[in-house]
Image: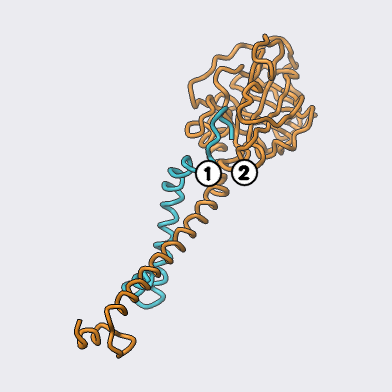
């Protein structure tokens, strides 16, 4: 649905659209790895190890 | 709605559309969007697992190796060398506890590989020390060589996993701590698995917080089982000897013993 809409509205031939989508996915993953996941990790229950501090 | 308008909006069929048909298509679209959002969420969760179990190790290994490099201490010779200094068992120079997150020592564990060397920094909070810097020293416990218990903590999995192979340690294995001035060679005396709240393992006399220490001990603490924080794996050791000086090396880590 929304990805279909995105695909229809991307410019260029199929291979250009595919490249655009791949680059966008890479950027999203990079942002997640460098900023989002490090910020979210301390909130995860399996990362709650602090009584004596070890893990 | 009148017939001609419905005919103009209906693309797949020329049959007259009712208000019910429009609602049906709207619901189908909504379901499709929700489905795609859930697929996206699943992909992001998978990416998070990859980040936690793999990428934190990549970053941790790189960061901890860089910290050891930045200390700029005399490199350990790769060939076996006779230590210049004599092994000593008398009192070593007292060290003051450094500021929080300051790296003041390195740990060599031959059992974990000839290449194994990790920084030890002050503090055991995850955000400030254990995640970015590797091994942490419990504030208030003894410093290397002191009478008492030099207690350190480290990750067993993720974030560079400095204590990943802790279960491989056997009684008698050397744990070599290097400070800016000296070397301290401890030997493993026992291992145990305790609950997360059994903090008496890092007492000056492990298991007896009220006792006055007479021995020079080391304690490693890490998680157990792997990928869980349900219990703690504890390694106790006692000082075998220490070496004065940066240019003498314990035979334990140069292949001489």
Judged left or right of residue B146, residue B45 is left
Q: Residue at x 75, y 26 (%)?
A: B188
Q: Nearer the viewer, residue B42 or A34?
A: B42
Image position, residue B218 (x, y; %):
68, 22
Quadrant showing the N terminus of chain B: bottom left
Q: Nearer the viewer, residue B250 or B143?
A: B143
Hue used for the chain lettered A: cyan
The quarter of the displayed image where residue B79 is located: top right
Q: Residue at x 67, y 12 (%)?
A: B147
Q: Is residue B53 above or below residue B33?
A: above
Image position, residue A26 (x, y; %):
44, 59
Way the structure is coloured = by chain
- Tell me which label, 1 or 2, sits earlier in the chain: 1
Residue that mark 1 sits on: B59
Residue that mark 2 sits on: B227
- The subunit letter for the residue under badge 1 reads B
Q: Secondary structure at mark 1?
A: helix
């Amino acid at each position: 649905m929304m990805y279909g809409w995105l695909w229809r509205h991307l410019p260029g031939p199929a291979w250009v659209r595919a490249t655009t989508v791949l680059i966008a996915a890479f950027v999203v993953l990079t942002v997640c790895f460098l900023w989002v996941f490090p910020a979210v990790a301390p909130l995860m229950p399996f990362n709650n190890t602090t009584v004596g501090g070890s893990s | 709605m009148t017939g001609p308008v419905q005919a103009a909006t209906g693309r797949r069929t020329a049959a007259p559309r009712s208000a019910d048909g429009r609602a049906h298509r709207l619901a189908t679209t909504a379901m499709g969007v929700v489905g795609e959002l859930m697929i996206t969420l699943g992909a992001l969760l998978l990416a998070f697992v990859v980040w936690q179990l793999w990428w934190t190790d990549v970053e941790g290994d790189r960061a901890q190796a860089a910290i050891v490099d930045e200390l700029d201490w005399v490199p350990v010779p790769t060939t076996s060398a006779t230590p210049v200094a004599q092994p000593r068992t008398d009192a070593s120079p007292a060290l003051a506890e450094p500021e929080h997150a300051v790296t003041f020592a390195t740990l060599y564990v031959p059992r974990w590989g000839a290449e194994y060397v990790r920084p030890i920094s002050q503090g055991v909070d995850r955000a400030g020390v254990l995640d970015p810097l590797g091994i942490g020293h419990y504030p208030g416990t003894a410093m290397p060589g002191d009478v008492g218990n030099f207690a350190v903590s480290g990750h067993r999995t993720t974030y560079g996993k400095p204590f990943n192979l802790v279960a491989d340690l056997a009684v008698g294995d050397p744990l070599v701590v290097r400070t800016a001035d000296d070397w301290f060679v401890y030997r493993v005396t026992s291992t145990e698995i305790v609950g997360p709240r059994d903090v008496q393992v890092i007492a000056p006399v492990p298991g007896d917080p009220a006792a006055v220490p007479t021995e020079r001990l080391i304690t490693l603490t890490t998680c157990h089982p792997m990928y869980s924080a349900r219990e703690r794996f504890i390694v106790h050791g006692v000082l075998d000897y220490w070496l004065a000086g940066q240019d003498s090396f314990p035979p334990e880590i140069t292949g001489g013993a």
